Amino acid sequence: MAVKVLCIDDSPTIRQLVKRTLEPLGYVVSEAGDGQDGLNRAKSETFDFFLVDVNMPVLGGFDCVAGIKAHPGYSRTPVVFLTTETSAENRERGKQLGASGWMVKPFEPDSLVKIVGMLAG
């Protein structure tokens, strides 16, 4: 069964790059344009992996991830922040929320494939 990834990012370009990187390898990639949309999708569908930006309109990435991790079905589901943020404080906050990793944009497609493959099994 294919791994279902939800890419939550307000940049259509980033979402398309994630899709073009992962789908040829058999991943099923869905998109959400802001944190609230992503949280709603997470509650109404089932995903195996989340890629989440930090800075988004409506609901930011940290609050989105807190909502995802509060859902009983997602307590152990891998979440990786994919963001332009680089500060140690933000990384620590992500870790405290239960994030499995942190990638800085722009990203290398090979690095994305490696981290998703490693964490999603």
Image (cartoon, rainbow, N blue to C red):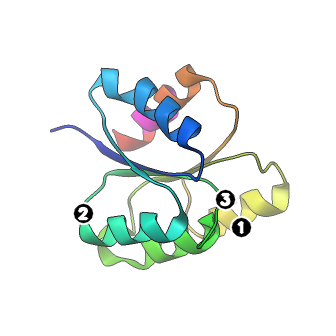
Looking at the picture, how far across and down is residue 43, in whole percent? 31, 72
* Nearer-N-terminus badge (1/3): 3
Label 2, label 1: how far apart the Cα atoms are: 26 Å
- Disc 1 versus disc 3: nearer the observer: 3
Q: Residues within 10 Å of mark 2 (few under 14, many from 20)?
A: few
Span highlighted in magenta in the image:
114-118
| Mark 1: secondary structure | helix
Tag 2's secondary structure? loop
> Secondary structure of the magenta portion, mostly?
helix
Residue at which label 1 appears: 93
- Name the image quarter holding residue 121: top left
Q: Residue furthest front?
A: 12
Spot occupied by residue 34 in the image (x, y as percentages of width and height): 53, 62
The three-letter code of the residue at mark 3 reads Val
Question: What's the amino acid at mark 2?
Answer: Glu
Find residue 15 and report its horizontal and vertical position in percent: 50, 40
Number of numbered discs visible in the structure rendering: 3
Specify few, some or many for label 1: CA neighbours under 10 Å numbering under 14, 14-19, or 20 or more.
few
Q: Is residue 21 above or below residue 72?
A: above
Q: CA distance from mark 1 to mark 3?
A: 11 Å
Residue 69, image x, y percentages: 45, 72
Image quarter of the N terminus? top left
Q: Nearer the viewer, mark 2 or mark 1?
A: 2
Task: Please check the rendered image and state whether residue 89 is part of the magenta-colored stretch, yes or no.
Answer: no
Quarter location, residue 32: bottom left
Which of 110/106 is in front?
A: 106
State the CA–CA distance, disc 3 to disc 2. 22 Å
- Disc 3: which residue: 54
Q: Which residue is mark 2?
A: 45
For the point 29% across and 70% down, the residue is: 73
Asked whether the residues under the numbered discs 2 and 1 touch, taking CB atoms below 8 Å apart as contact, a structural biologist would say no
